[in-house]
Each structure stands twice: as C-alpha cells, then as structure tokens.
Amino acid sequence: QVQLVESGGGLVQAGGSLRLSCAASGLTFSAYAMGWFRQAPGKEREFVAAISWSDSRTQYEYSVKGRFTISRDNTKNTVYLQMNSLKSEDTAVYYCAAAPNFGVVVGQYGIDYWGQGTQVTVSS
C-alpha cells in the first residue's frame, strides 16, 4: 500500500520559514517524480513545485520562485519543501504527490498518489 505522509506544517509569522517533509512508502521512490501542491480555502488546488526522479529538474509556480526550494533524498524516500519569506497568501493545505513522469506532476493530471496534506498558516 502506497503512503505519502506530509509533516512540518504549522503557524508562522509572515517573513518566517517552514520546511515541509513528505515520507513515501510502498513505492519505488527513486522512480517517481514528486511534487507539492496547495489548496487555500475556497480556491482550487494549485501546483507549487516539482522535482524529477533524479532531482536534475525542478519547476516552480511563479509566485513561489526564489522563496521555495524543492529537494529530495532518495535514500530516505523523502521529498522536502523549504519555504522562506512566507506571506499570508501562502496559507493553505499543502499536499505532496507522486507520478512516474515529471510532466504529469507539473500538469496535475493523472497523478498516481496523493498525501493527506499538512496545514500551513502564515499570520500577517
């Protein structure tokens, strides 16, 4: 059974930092591209960042570029999202996702697995 378990969310002041983690089990982690998505109240889920299986490729949503960094450790079956200079508009539930293809993760369509999500709240 595949599981993606996010952690690291919480309440932080604007300008602060958080590091999200997503631990994967039940799949060959190094064969999957991974991504982070978020959904704010009343809004659709949106793409945040993606990383290829070999971490040679990354892509970011425009509003987080330069503030967020996605990385992965294939020895620990974990993907991370380092979030710096947080803003109130970053408040959302953050989800990690896995798919065999980098383009699938970026496009959100056809993703194989989703985590349960972790809440990030940024106070202004």
Image (spheres, rainbow, N blue to C red):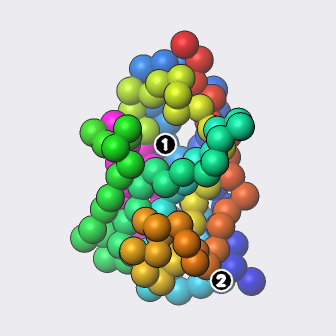
Q: Secondary structure at mark 1?
A: strand
Q: Earlier in the sequence, mark 2 or mark 1?
A: 1
Residue at the image point whose x is 53% and y is 86% from the top: 28
Q: Are marks 2 and 1 in contact (CB under 8 Å)?
A: no
| In this view, 111 is above or below 61 | below
**Residue 22 x %, y %:** 57, 59
Query: Looking at the image, is 34 positioned above or below residue 70?
Result: below
User: Type of residue at label 1?
Assistant: Arg
Q: CA distance from mark 2 to mark 1?
A: 23 Å
Task: Place residue 97 in its image quadrant.
Answer: bottom right
Closer-to-camera residue (29/87)? 87
Left or right: 120, with 13 as reference point: right
Picture layout, residue 39 above or below residue 54: above
Question: Mark on residue 102?
Answer: none
Q: Residue at x 38, y 40 (%)?
A: 64
Q: Residue at x 71, y 37 (%)?
A: 42
Please name the residue shown 63% across and 29% down the image: 121
Instruction: Give the magenta range.
Output: 67-82
**Please, what is the three-letter code of the amino acid marked with disc 2?**
Gly
Q: Hey, which quadrant is residue 10 in on the image?
A: top right
Residue beneath label 1, please? 19
The residue that label 2 is drawn on is 26
Q: Is residue 7 visible?
A: no
- Name the foreground residue: 26 vs 68: 68
